[in-house]
Every structure is written in structure tokens, then in C-alpha cells.
Amino acid sequence: MKHAWLIAVLSSLIALITLSGCTVLPVYTVRVDNQSSKAIMARLERRPTMNNMVEMASAHVSKESSKVLGPLEAPPLERVYIVIQSPSDLHALPDSHKIKRGNWVVTISDGSSTSWGAYEISVRKE
């Protein structure tokens, strides 16, 4: 009788731990502040594997304006990136920055005359 009670308690505890672990998903929110003189495309994507990408959200951000991507959930072990690209040059490689769960601010400004890029990107946790 004591063993049946112990087995019931342990199985309930294991089920509770398993279910609570599956429902907790990381949440990502990114505010994109475009302080540059050109429009940009911003997208939030998760990468389940090295060769696979899943777009979570995207936005066209006009010059000197802001947009918010999220809040969005992603599986706990997948990598999440904020990707910035010029809509006028879709053949150029986009800038991508890995982020962790939470609230982020991405600030885009015009590139300096000594840099190779058309804009400079600052990514910080809020």
C-alpha cells in the first residue's frame, strides 16, 4: 500500500515537471529605431538548424521612424536573430545579430564615411 502511494506521488510530480517545462517558451520583443536617411527591412527569425530559417515577423521601417516586432514566442533551444537589410539592395548580405529572450532595441544610423557599410547598427538589451 505504501508503494502504490509513493508511485502515484512520483508519477504526478514527474508529469507536473514535464508539463510545466513544455509550456514555458521564451518571448522576444524588438523595437527597431531607424535613425538613418534610408528605409530598411527588419525581420525576426528563428533558426532551428544551420540550414533552416523561419521568419517570425518582419517590417518595413521608413527613415527616421520606429516599429516593434513582437512579442513573439520561440522554442527554448532555437537561436533567434534580428536581421536588417536595405530594401533597395536585396542582393547584398543582410546584417544579422543573435539575440536572447527579452526586450531589445536596435538602432540604425547612417554609416560613417570611413566604414564599408551603408549604415551602422547598435543592438542592446532594454
Image: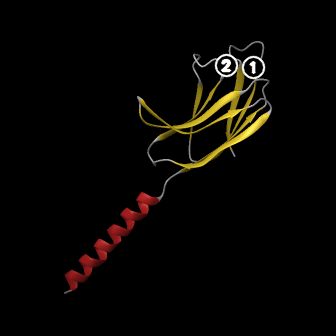
Looking at the picture, how far across and down is residue 26, in whole percent? Answer: 52, 51
Q: What colour scheme has been applied to the protein in the rendered image?
A: secondary structure
Looking at the picture, how far across and down is residue 31, in whole percent? Answer: 69, 42
Residue that numbered label 1 is attached to: 111
Tag 2: residue type? Answer: Ser
Q: Nearer the viewer, mark 2 or mark 1?
A: 2
Give the residue at x 35% y 71%. Answer: 13
Q: Secondary structure at mark 1?
A: loop
**118 versus 26 height, above or below:** above
**38 versus 14 height, above or below:** above
**66 versus 103 height, above or below:** above
**28 versus 51 height, above or below:** below
Q: Secondary structure at mark 2?
A: loop
Image-based side of 126 in relation to 3, left or right: right
Looking at the picture, how far across and down is residue 102, in whole percent? Answer: 61, 49
Residue that numbered label 2 is attached to: 88
